[in-house]
Image: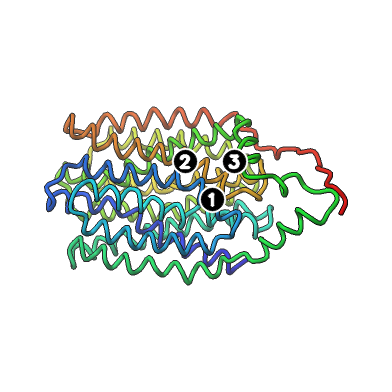
Amino acid sequence: MKQVLLCGAMVVTLSMGVRHGFGLWLQPITSEMDWTRQNFSIALAIQNLAWGLFGVFVGMAADRFGAFKVLAAGAVCYSVGLLGMAYAPTPFWFAMFTGVLLGLAQAGTTYAVVYGVVGRQIPAEKRSWAMGVTAAAGSFGQFLMLPLEGGLINALGWQSALLVLAAAMLGIVPLALGLREPQFAKASKRSAAAAPVGNPADIQTARQAMKEAFSQPSFLLLAAGYFVCGFQVVFIGVHMPSYLRDYNMPAYVATYSLALIGLFNVFGTYLAGWLGQSMERRKILSFIYFARAVVIAVFLLAPLTQASVYIFSAVMGTLWLSTVPPTNATVAQIFGVRHLSMLSGVVFFGHQVGSFMGVWLGGYLYDRTGSYDVVWYIAIALGILAGLVNIPVNEKPLVRKPVLQPAM
């Protein structure tokens, strides 16, 4: 169990740590390449959408073949995508590398794949906690990597900084060795062929699991809430640095604010995972979304100072990815762990559609209005909506009829 948690945490630290810093490249790239913020934003929007879309199929692959191969391929894609991001000559090629390829890479190196391993290897009574530990590692990655990325940009320039990160992402490959599941493939074959009476979840096909999930309203409500999570965190993560620079804040304020989000998210995600062991997770999720709406509203109403930015970042950081452990643990509790990577990927697709809208609308409405105000207001309204839709989620495990298999 320790090996799974350690290697999974390190993988997420690298993959999510780099991903959270992309907003730091917005102004250097658009200024040097003479592109608009919308050019940059659409590439990040495509990235988030591609991440969600590929995540469903990557999850299927991880459930069938184990996580190691998927993680190794994802690491290579991540490295190549960062190289392409550094040398893309036009907005189109920037969108192909930064959007499509890095989206595929993130699908193969982040939560859906790692949580599939955690869900299968960690006992159910510790699963929510373990997912909280993994998510907290991703948050620590943001805290650790953001100052590093900002320092690399300042010291080496934005292109060379991307080259350093491209090399670092290959470190995921040896870490993935600790997440191999050779026993999983053998066990699944035995369970499908040996026992005369089997657990229906063990012999369920991916298509059947998908159909079952979409027939459950709670699954759709979790995806709807995740849409809002994606909208809020990616809009803030990508556009917050430029928002602060528009108000003449020093560049280091943006770097420190995003790092604070990562630091406090360590505590928030761990706490959410720990509370999910004993509290109804739907209530945890509703509280998080309502709280986000309040925090954003107070931030906009208060005078904008360095202190207010840091306070906002700390409080918002506590709520940042704290939706991840209770959402994924609820999916595992309702449907079981056999197709957990795939179903987590499907729910996460809702998150990434929201991410697409958040990052794209941020750039689009800024270019049209010269302000981020409208997007902030949308984020508040969506937070209230997400708080409401999580209230009726039914967390009880599905009861399936035993399936009789023919005697051999």
Tell me the mark number nearer the camera, choosing from 3 and 1: 1
Q: Left of 67 or right of it: where is 146? A: left
Tell me the mark number nearer the camera, choosing from 2 and 3: 2
Q: Residue furthest bottom?
A: 174
Given the image, on which type of amino acid does mark 3 rest? Arg
The residue closer to the viewer here, 129 or 212, is 212
Name the residue located 27 percent from the left edge and 61 percent from the top edge: 83
| Circle number at residue 281 | 3
Residue position marked by numbered label 1 in the rendering: 59
| Circle number at residue 349 | 2
Residue 294 in percent (x, y) is at 39, 33
Label 1 or label 2, whichever comes before in sequence order = 1
Quarter occupied by residue 298: top left
Q: Left of 14 or right of it: where is 251? A: left
Label 2 to label 3, Cα distance in Å?
A: 20 Å
Judged from the image, the secondary structure of the residue bearing numbered disc 1 is helix
Q: Indicate whether 82 appears above or below 405.
A: below
Which colour assignment does the render follow? rainbow
The residue closer to the viewer here, 242 or 63, is 63
Judged from the image, the secondary structure of the residue bearing numbered disc 2 is helix
Q: Left of 334 or right of it: where is 220? A: left
Q: Indicate whether 13 appears above or below 111.
A: below
Name the residue located 66 percent from the left edge and 61 percent from the top edge: 185
Near mark 3 (Cα within 10 A), the count class, few <14, some 14-19 or many ≥20, is many
Residue 189 in percent (x, y) is at 72, 58
Residue 14 in percent (x, y) is at 40, 62
Name the residue located 24 percent from the left edge and 64 percent from the top edge: 161
Quarter occupied by residue 335: top right
